[in-house]
């Protein structure tokens, strides 16, 4: 396959051959083009033009060939630069620069390449800083690159990675170090809060920092066996209206559980939810009602919901929004409407005139007109009833007459069968109305007369034909409830109104129902029947009433028609509601003051006895505690790592 440059060289050669093949410089340039040396051919013309600057023909060919060559090379250079092949693009730009040193596209392209190379170097520096955990320096470099080139893919990827790392680092710790989860046994009775935490700190290595408003002299009574230190701390804090903030895996800040202190110490996070299916207003109402979040921002254009709350509350909101943001079910309704009609017309007998007259008829007359020497003769046929009055005393010109034809034999038997089938298929969302209209819109004109203004006419349209209204309701068990409304109308006759207006008498058959079908089940709705029979006779008075013989003096017309409409509807579920995972499981919502916090529960810890822990499962059944160690056992094994017994110091009342 020929390359674009080779095709360009061939084109140049043809143009030069057709143009001015007599110039030696042009001949040499043509030979260079034939060899595919486009740059050399342009340089040869440029050199010849310097020797003969007044040669207009040579000048025109030089600029034309230079512009064509530069344009083709610039297209190839831009393609290579966009594809990321920097070296190939730079080489093409330099080739164009040799041909046209002042080309602005060359300057812009080389500047883009230099900036791209500089950006690649800066991005590599940022990646190295990320490896050294210098997040601030890496972010500064990446943002400077994106300020110059917002579409730089690698810089955007690294910045997103940096944001994820910062987000994970900013989320406060949720539990103490796993080493502090080993079970211990504690017994304190009416012991100051400060003393209890001091004992726990010495035995576990935890660090406790107390807010200045914490009442450290509060008496604490607690008896726990085989319970983790983390759970013991939580239990003590909850029972004394205190709250904690984990500074790291072994440091805890204790402060009063009051709204003022919660605002001061409680960590908040921000989360953006881009909803795909749910309405953002409905999602906002859900979060406000159940999570009690006050700081909410919504954007209806982006269907975006942004909330700011505690980590537990945001996690609960995420679970709730997952169950709300579900794609709505859709169903395909396959509808068949069949109108079956049958008609029969029988008209048989002699039709006699119903009037006999006696009067004067117009005679046949001829009229002659001469126009420009041309004679034209017109014959007016007579036989029509003459206008005016008749003198019965003068019978001249009077005659008896009947309407034409005087006698007619009707021999007509007409039978018709017709089927009209409409098979629309329509896709409908759950609980949304859909309408189908197959027919015509008849214009109906209405005139309005206003004093001192005149008459104004307006037009409205009347729907005639088949109209079908459906509203499906899709259930989780793959059944569809459909509210169906069917109406079939046709024009019975036209009615003339005043001032030339026209109205229509419309015949209508309609039915409405609600049915529930399985997926793919077909239901037939029939019974919309119109049965009409008409009989009329045209007889001679007296003679037409004679039995049997009267048929010779009469004409009988029998007309019957029958129409039935059948509707077949089949729902086919395209997409049903996908149940989210864990929909039936209970989601821990915390308490009124701590929304989304895990529940404090007591569960059996075999074989050590009662163990307090935080979990999302339902409450556990406590079992009798294990037998506490004796003082001798405690003396021989003071560490007791699997269940240390820390007796409380004697209270003031028990001291001798």
Image (spheres, grey):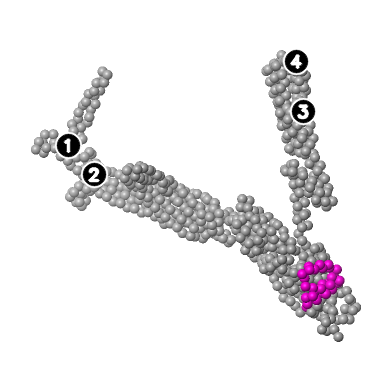
Residue 52 marker: 4
Quickly name the residue at label 2.
Answer: 351
Q: Nearer the viewer, mark 1 or mark 2?
A: 1
Q: Which residues are magenta?
A: 192-221
Q: Residues within 10 Å of mark 4 (few under 14, many from 20)?
A: few
Residues at marks 3 and 4, CA–CA distance in whole angstroms: 23 Å
User: Can residue 5 be seen?
Assistant: no
Image x and y of residue 470, in percent? 49, 55
Residue located 21% across and 46% down the image = 553
Q: Nearer the viewer, mark 3 or mark 1?
A: 3
* Mark 3 or mark 1: whose residue is earlier in sequence: 3
Image x and y of residue 336, in percent? 48, 51
Q: Nearer the viewer, residue 628 or 206?
A: 206
Q: Nearer the viewer, residue 339 or 246?
A: 246
Residues at marks 3 and 1, CA–CA distance in whole angstroms: 107 Å
Residue located 88% across and 78% down the image = 634
596 up-or-down from 301: above or below: below
Residue 459 part of the magenta-drawn span: no
Quickly name the residue at label 1.
Answer: 388
Q: Residues within 10 Å of mark 2 (few under 14, many from 20)?
A: many
* Mark 2 or mark 4: whose residue is earlier in sequence: 4
Q: Residue furthest bottom?
A: 656
**Is 477 on the left-hand or right-hand side of 211?**
left
124 up-or-down from 312: above or below: above
Q: Residue furthest front?
A: 212
Q: Residues within 10 Å of mark 1 (few under 14, many from 20)?
A: few
């Amino acid at each position: 396959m020929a390359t674009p440059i080779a095709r360009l060289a061939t084109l140049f050669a043809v143009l030069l051959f057709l143009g001015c093949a007599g110039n030696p410089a042009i001949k040499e340039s043509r030979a260079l083009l034939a060899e595919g040396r486009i740059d050399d051919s342009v340089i040869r013309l440029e050199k010849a033009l310097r020797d003969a600057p007044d040669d207009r023909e040579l000048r025109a060919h030089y600029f034309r060939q230079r512009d064509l060559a530069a344009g083709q090379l610039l297209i190839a250079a831009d393609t290579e630069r966009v594809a990321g092949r920097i070296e190939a693009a730079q080489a093409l730009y330099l080739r164009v620069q040799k041909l046209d040193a002042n080309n602005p596209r060359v300057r812009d392209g080389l500047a883009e390449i230099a900036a791209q190379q500089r950006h690649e170097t800066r991005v590599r520096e940022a990646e190295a800083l990320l490896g050294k955990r210098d997040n601030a320096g890496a972010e500064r470099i990446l943002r400077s690159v994106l300020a110059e080139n917002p579409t730089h893919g690698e810089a955007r990827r690294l910045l997103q990675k940096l944001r994820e790392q910062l987000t994970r680092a900013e989320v406060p710790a949720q539990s103490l170090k796993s080493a502090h989860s080993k079970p211990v046994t504690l017994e304190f009775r009416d012991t100051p809060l400060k003393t209890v935490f001091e004992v726990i700190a010495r035995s576990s290595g935890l660090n406790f920092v107390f807010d200045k408003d914490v009442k450290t002299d509060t008496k604490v009574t607690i008896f726990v066996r085989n319970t983790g230190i983390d759970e013991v701390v939580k239990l003590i804090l909850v029972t004394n209206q205190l709250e904690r903030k984990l500074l790291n895996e072994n440091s805890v800040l204790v402060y009063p559980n009051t709204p003022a202190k919660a605002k001061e110490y409680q960590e908040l996070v921000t989360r953006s939810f881009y909803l795909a299916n749910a309405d953002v207003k409905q999602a906002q109402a859900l979060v406000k009602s159940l999570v009690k979040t006050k700081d909410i921002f919504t954007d209806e254009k982006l269907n975006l919901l942004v909330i700011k709350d505690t980590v537990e509350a945001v996690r609960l909101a995420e679970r709730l929004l997952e169950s709300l943001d579900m794609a709505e079910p859709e169903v395909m309704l396959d509808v068949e409407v069949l109108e079956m009609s049958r008609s029969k017309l029988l008209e048989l007998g002699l039709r006699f005139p119903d009037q006999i007259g006696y009067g004067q008829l117009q005679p046949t007359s001829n009229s002659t007109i001469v126009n420009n020497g041309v004679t034209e003769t017109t014959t007016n046929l007579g036989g029509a009833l003459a206008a005016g009055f008749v003198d019965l005393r003068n019978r001249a010109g009077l005659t008896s007459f009947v309407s034409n034809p005087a006698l007619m034999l009707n021999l007509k038997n007409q039978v018709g069968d017709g089927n009209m089938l409409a098979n629309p298929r329509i896709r409908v969302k759950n609980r949304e109305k859909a309408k189908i209209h197959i027919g015509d819109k008849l214009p109906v004109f209405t005139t309005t007369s206003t004093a001192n203004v005149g008459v104004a006419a307006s037009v409205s349209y009347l729907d005639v034909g088949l109209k079908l209204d459906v509203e499906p309701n899709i259930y989780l068990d793959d059944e569809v409830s459909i509210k169906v409304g069917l109406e079939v109308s046709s024009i019975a006759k036209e009615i003339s109104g005043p001032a030339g207006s026209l109205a229509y008498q419309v015949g209508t058959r309609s039915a409405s129902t609600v049915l529930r079908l399985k997926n793919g089940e077909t239901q037939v709705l029939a019974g919309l029947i119109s049965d009409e029979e008409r009989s009329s006779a045209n007889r001679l008075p007296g003679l037409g009433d004679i039995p049997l013989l009267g048929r010779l003096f009469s004409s009988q017309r029998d007309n019957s028609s029958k129409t039935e409409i059948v509707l077949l509807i089949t729902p086919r579920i395209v997409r049903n509601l996908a149940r989210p995972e864990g929909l039936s499981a209970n989601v821990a919502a915390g308490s009124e003051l701590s929304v989304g916090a895990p529940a404090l529960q007591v569960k059996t810890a075999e074989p050590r006895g009662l163990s307090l822990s935080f979990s999302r499962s339902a409450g556990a059944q406590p079992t009798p505690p294990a037998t506490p160690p004796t003082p001798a056992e405690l003396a021989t094994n003071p560490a007791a790592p699997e269940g240390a017994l820390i007796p409380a110091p004697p209270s003031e009342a028990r001291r001798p």
